[in-house]
Image (spheres, grey):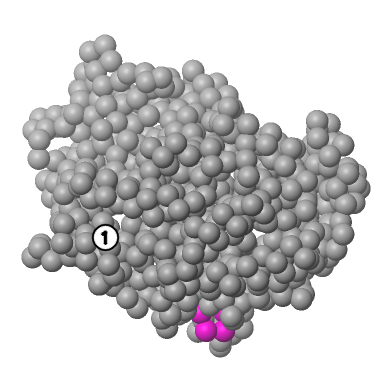
Amino acid sequence: MNAKELEEYFLKQLDNGRCHLSVAKGKASYKMKRGSFTTRDRMWDRHNLTFQYKEENRYLFGDGKVQAEIILDRDPWVKFHFHVDPGFNRFQLSFDGFADEHIYGCGEQYTAVDLKGKNVPIWVSEHQKVLLIAKKLLRWKIFGENPDHINPFKQQQTYCAVPSFISSKHYGFYCHEDSYGELEFKKERLIIKFREIPQSISLLTGDSIQEVAVKMCELVGIQPKIPDWVNDGLILAVQGGADVVRQKVKQAKEKGLKIAAIWSQDWSGNVVTSFGYQVYWNWEKSDSLYPDLPGLIQELKEQGIRFLGYINPYLKEDAPLYKEAKTRGFLVRRKNGEPYHIKSTTFDAGIVDLTNPLAYNWYKNIIKKNMIGIGLSGWMADFGEYLPTDAVVYGNRAEKLHNRWPSLWAKCCYDAVQESGVEDEIFYFNRAAYGHTIRYTSSMWNGDQHVDFSDEYGLGSLIPANIGLACSGVGITHSDIGGYTTVMFMKRNAELLKRWSEMNIFSPIYRTHEGNRPKENVQYDHPEVIDEFVQNTELFVKLKPYREKVYQEYYENHIPAIRPVFFEYEEEPFLTLNRQYLFGKDLMVAPVFRAGKEDIPVYLPNDDYIQLFTNQPMKKGQNTVKTPIGLPIAFYRKDSEFKELFESLKLSF
């Protein structure tokens, strides 16, 4: 079907009895532990409403007791507006889909590319659960490491939930609603559920999957442009104080490492807990670790190196800014009036009430004064998932605001940058998102992956995550090179760091993370790693002209940078492929996702591809490719306008 026929296919269901609408009354309960949620919903007074009659663009549904209207308009795409009798707060709408379609999106889904047959919760949460991590470690201890293991999909949660999806049949839906939702994709039915009556739902159609994805990008909003300096090398994670930063920079430069920026998340101080080396959540420079931070920032800038920090929307209990926020009434409260604390690993923190205009401006000004004001060129804008549903907030019910919270947090950063007039200089990146959050952040990052090759939490989770993001309107994203989460015997080794580094050459951002236990993880300067890091950073820098074209395709044409292969090639096996991706139009990337792999299968479409670095022409269909460490696995289109650049790339490792 073409775009017009797809519109007619869904609109016709409104009056032929195939569109089902039901409403009910309900009350939900939620339990949150370290950002992970469990929930139950009790419903009553349910009404299954049937089509009654149509007046122009107005469709009336009812059952003799309850009425609902669906009103259509174009904005610029078909949009369904809903009006329901007062008192109802549970909503379900379903359409006929297609038995042979594939479904993509719903935000960042780490374990599945195709969501057909799945019931996907739309609720911003911590991706990791303590209990599941413990079970994973126990399994590995008893039975050995098993990177293939994936828990049932119903146990999956995500930092970035987006109330939308797109189909391989060239259509998609976006739900304009913030409450808890579920998108259920049965064999031939699409079911949309929310715990409020949605404001509206948009239907997007096109003549290709990519065209629908482009419209999704335009609907959620285009991300702010990345500053040019991000292209100039590695964003190197270094912490431990000014002396350590100077020493690491000196040693890295002597090795030939090209550094765009230093990212010191402990700029505000550190807290050592049972989980590891953590940030002191009080957003003022640490005089003990960085006695003259503005001076250090200027010193590095004179060497062409920027300085990045860290911030989140929480304040550690009893820290100076926490005390100020508590005194001024700027914290989210419990029903008894006391500050509502969330727990991060072992310490408690208060939540800044971003719905309170005074608190919002106060926090925004902290960013402007304490971060931008001393010369920081950016930061990790962490968290945003932890708003408890039983909290008391200034703006509305916390349950209603939970999914919107990451957008408020990202916009706080965005407003601070815009009001300071430094939008061409500042780069910040967010973990949590919902819907329109995207328009307020330079980049998403994939969150706290485990320092392993596992498909559920580690390196193997990244392609499904990025395909989901690309199909949800997210154009610029990246990951921590080497992952983050280290627990017990789960530690980063040299091979993992090398393979992750090889993959991230072909991404918008090239950034490391030391992890929560830096001393237990292999780092970039390990003797087994440093030479390849130098090589890979050089390759990242040399690819700048191509990467700028990829950026342009997103900012101007709204095609995500990291994209599924089916954006260009709508054929099997690419419709469900989770081991390859396109970076821009011309580079096919096939990362190595397992330890000890000497070769991997690679599928190439009916096009002419050449292996990068070897300049070996490839055959169409399945290939077996040798994968020695030090050879990033990627392929370029023979007729690319960047063919000469690709041919010129040489390996030094």
Residue at the spot of label 1:
351
User: Where's residue 402, x and y in %?
Assistant: 28, 52
Residue 487 falls within the magenta-colored stretch: yes
> In the displayed image of the protein, which residue is found farthest to the top?
56
User: Where's residue 604, x and y in %?
Assistant: 78, 44
- Residue nearest the viewer, comparing 461 with 159: 159
Picture quarter containing residue 624?
A: bottom right
> In the displayed image of the protein, which residue is found farthest to the bottom?
142
Please give the name of the residue rendered at 63% of the width and 45% of the height, measured from the top-left corner. Answer: 229
Residue 457 falls within the magenta-colored stretch: no
User: The C terminus appears in which quarter of the rendering?
Assistant: bottom right
Residue 403 drawn above or below residue 449? above
> In the displayed structure, does residue 604 sit left or right of residue 132?
right
- Residue nearest the viewer, comparing 319 with 449: 319
Q: What count of labels does the image hold?
A: 1
User: Where's residue 531, x and y in %?
Assistant: 80, 67
Q: What are the residue bounds of the magenta stretch?
A: 486-491
Amino acid at circle 1: Ile
Is most of the magenta stretch helix, strand or loop? loop
User: Where's residue 291, x and y in %?
Assistant: 47, 69
Q: Mark 1: which secondary structure? A: strand
Please give the name of the residue rendered at 45% of the width and 53% of the height, measured from the top-left corner. Answer: 374
- Residue nearest the viewer, comparing 59 with 112: 112
- Residue nearest the viewer, comparing 53 with 386: 386
Residue 136 drawn above or below residue 559? below
Residue 643 drawn above or below residue 604? above
Label 1: few (<14), some or many (≥20) within 10 Å?
A: many
> In the displayed structure, does residue 486 sit left or right of residue 87?
right
Q: Is residue 471 at all visible to an observer of this figure? A: no
Please give the name of the residue rendered at 29% of the width and 31% of the height, measured from the top-left corner. Answer: 200
